[in-house]
Amino acid sequence: MALRINDTAPDFTANTSTGTIKFHDWIGDGWAMLFSHPKDFTPVCATELGYVAKINGEFAKRGCKVIGLSVDRVDDHLKWAADIEDLAGTKLNFPIIADEDLEVAKLYDMLPADEGGSSEGRTAADNQTVRSVFLIAPDKKIKMSLTYPMSTGRNFDELLRVLDSCQLTAKHKVATPANWAKGEDVIILPSVNNDAAKELFPDGWETVKPYLRKVKDPSS
C-alpha cells in the first residue's frame, strides 16, 4: 500500500555501512531524511552522496539525521565510499543501508512486493523506482516524500528548505508560500480566525485577501 504524508514511517532493522540499526531507534527524538539509490557505483547517485556529505552539517544544525539506502551489500557501500570521498573531497559521514534483500525498498513501496528477494544480478534500471526521499518527523510520521527519475540529481538545498518549512509549521499555526526561504514572511493558517490570530501574532499582519494573511516569520 502506498505511503502517504502523515503515515507512520515503517520501522525495520538493517545492516548499514556503519553497523546494524533499528530505524525508529536510530531516528531517536529528532528528524530524519531517508534517501534511496537504485545501485552502487552509479554516477548521479555518487554526486548526490558526495553533496550530502558536504552539507550534512546543515541537516545536523536542524536536528535532522541523514541516511542513504542502496540496493547492494555493505562491502559494496564501503568500496563506493572511497569513490565518493575522491569525488567530493570529504568523507561519507552518514550511514548507507545495505538493502541487498530489497526489504526496505518494498516496505517503502519503491519496488513491488513480488519483485524478488535479492540484489544479485539486478541493474540500476531494474531498481530505477528506488529514487525516493522521505522526510520523517520526531513522531515517526512521514512529512514529505518525493520520487525522482534516475537521470535527475536531487536538489538537496531544496530539501533543506522543505525541512525548514516543516519544522516551522510544526511549531506555529502558519504555512509557507511559494518559493519561501527561512526568515521570509509566512501565511496564517485559514483555520485561525482573526481573534485567535491577534493572540498569536500581536504585532499584526497584512491581509492580502480574506483568506491570505501574511505575517513575519515567528521564528525570526
Image: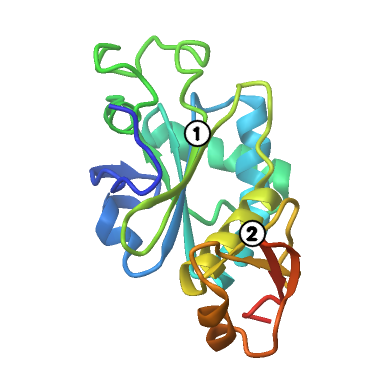
Q: Nearer the viewer, residue 217 or 161?
A: 217
Q: How many marks?
A: 2
Name the quarter where the N terminus is drawn: top left
Picture coordinates of residue 14, whole percent (x, y)? 26, 42
Q: Return the residue at label 2.
A: 211
Left or right: 190 with respect to 106? right
Task: Give the answer, above or below, for where 52 lies relative to 201.
Answer: above
Which of pointers 2 and 1 indicates the residue nearer the eye? 2
Position above or below: 46 against 192: above
Q: Residue at (72%, 41%) from the top-left corner?
A: 87
- Please say if the residues under marks 2 and 1 sit with CB atoms less than 8 Å apart: no
Q: Secondary structure at mark 1?
A: strand
Q: Residue at x 63, y 80 (%)?
A: 218
Residue 91: x, y in percent? 60, 54
On-image quarter of the C terminus:
bottom right
Local packing at callout 2 (Cα closer than 10 Å; few below 14, some 14-19, many 20+) is: few
- Residue 162 found in image quarter: bottom right
97 left or right of 62? Answer: left
Quadrant of residue 10 in the image?
top left
Q: Nearer the viewer, residue 123 or 128?
A: 128
Task: Name which residue lies at 55% across and 62% down.
Answer: 190
Q: Which residue is mark 1?
A: 132
Foreground of the two, 181 or 50: 181
Q: CA distance from mark 2 to mark 1?
A: 34 Å
Locate residue 119, reporting x and y percent.
35, 19
Question: For numbered disc 2, what is the local secondary structure?
Answer: loop
* Amino acid residing under circle 1: Ser
Q: Nearer the viewer, residue 17 or 102?
A: 102
In the picture provided, is 85 more to the left or to the right than 133?
Answer: right
| Location of residue 137 by image quarter | bottom left
Residue neighbourhood size for the residue with mark 1, other residues' Cα within 10 Å, grouped as few (<14), some (14–19), many (≥20)? many
Q: Earlier in the sequence, mark 2 or mark 1?
A: 1
